[in-house]
Each structure stands twice: as structure tokens, then as C-alpha cells.
Amino acid sequence: MLKDFRADLHMHTCLSPCAEIDMTPREIVRVSIERGLDIIAVTDHNSAENAEAAQRAARGTGLGVLAGMEVTSSEEVHVLALFESPDSARMMQEVVYENIPSGENDERLYGHQIVVNEDNEVLGFNKRLLISATKLNVGRIVEIVFSFGGISIASHVDRESFSILSQLGFIPEGLKFDALELSPNMSRDRAETVFASIRAFTWVSFSDAHYVKDIGKRITTFTLKEPTFEEIRQALALKDGRSVSWS
Ligand SMILES: [Zn+2]
Ligand SMILES: [Zn+2]
């Protein structure tokens, strides 16, 4: 028996310098439940340090939380990396941290990068240049995500910056994204017309929320046996009747 699950797998917490301070793990979980979501993913820029707090905040609520991040490649392409376990996310984070340019985040210029626990207590401020491009190219990122058992999704491919199409102009052959993400302001009909050439990939669409008001603004419905990471992966591969849909 397959069932529908409402998912928003792209949102930023207060760890992302460009996200609002109210985007704490606890608040994200509360609002996601209020808006009827079943599965979310925490995907801060180049870091997963707030993901586990969201997972802990969601314990016992029925909301599924995937640990992830949005990695910026050396070509300035954003790639969503989603993982089953916080351990895999942490391993990914280690590789990303090794490949972030040295230097400190200028909070006045870019904003704060706040690490928070599930009770909304500030644990510290991340000083790394999370907003910058890593030294990893997009192909390497997809490989590393795969090696840690993760799912990689090319972020907001319709956007005019930080997307694989804006930066490379095409999707290189052999790049095995599990899916491509369309941004919330792109309608399904328009996407079908403009992006017909990349229809071979599975398409998803999420909110990319940086503000509380935007959580769940765009969702993708996953048709699964149960709301697990492996089922999500199989749905992206459209296996055995599993599917994804958005409009
Ligand atoms: Zn992005
Ligand atoms: Zn994002």
C-alpha cells in the first residue's frame, strides 16, 4: 500500500547567514507540523550543524527530519545533499569544512551563523565562511554524497544564479543527480515548456525557506510505502509505483 507524504526538503536555519534568526530548529519543526508537512530536511549552506537539533526537536511528533546541507561547488552551483543518518551528514560536513576557504565570516556583511539546540538555546556562532564556494567541483560533490549513501539534488535549476544551468549552462553527461529542484516561483506548466530538455531527471520543488513565513510554501508529495530515507530515494528513481509530484 502506497501513501502520500508531504515533503519540504530544502530549508535553512539561523545557521545560514542569509536566513532569519527566528528559523531555529525548534521553530521549524513546530511550524512544519502546523502546516501539515510529513517530512522536512534541514539544509544550511555548507553545514549540517543545526540538523540534529531539528531531529531531536521532532522526536515523538511524527514529523520526519532529514539531515542535510546545501553545498556550494567551486563553480558556485548549489547542490542539496540529504542523508539518512546524522553521522553521514557529519562526514559530509567534515569534507566540506576541509574545502571551505579559510577566513572568518563577517557578521556585519553576511549575517550571523547561529548554532542552536532543540530548546532554542544558542550553543555558539559558526565562524567559517559558510556562504562561500567550496573547492569541490559539482561532480566531486555528487560523488562524495553518493559515497556517504546520500541523495544529491541540483538546487533551484531555474534560478539565474547558483544553479547548475546558470553556472554551467547544461547538465554534464554522467552527473548522477537523484533529482533536480525547481524553485517555488516556477509553475509546473512553465517548467515543462522551458526545461523540456532536462525532463529525463526527476523533478522536485521545495520552499528553500529562509523565513518562517515560507516554510512549506512549495511542497513535493512523495508516494511511498513508509516515510523513510530509502523510500524517498526509490521514489526519486520512480521504482515500483512510487512517485513524486508537485504543482
Ligand atoms: Zn541555493
Ligand atoms: Zn537554499
Image (spheres, grey):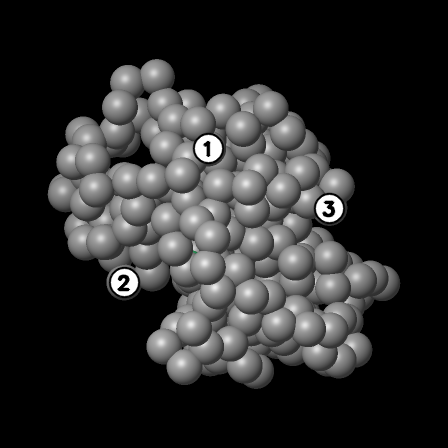
At label 2, which amino acid type do we have? Asn
At label 3, which amino acid type do we have? Pro
The residue under label 2 is 185
Residue 71 coordinates in the image, percent (x, y): 46, 46
The residue under label 3 is 86
Q: Which mark is residue 85?
A: none
The residue under label 1 is 141
Q: Is residue 62 above or below residue 3?
A: below
Residue 235 coordinates in the image, percent (x, y): 54, 33
Element at label 2: loop
Q: Is residue 127 above or below residue 94?
A: below
Q: Tell me whether circle 1 and circle 3 mark residues in contact (CB < 8 Å).
A: no
At label 1, which amino acid type do we have? Ile
The mark lying in front, picked from 2 and 3, is 3
Determine which quarter of the picture holds residue 39. bottom right
Mark pair 2, 1: CA separation: 26 Å
The mark lying in front, picked from 1 and 3, is 1
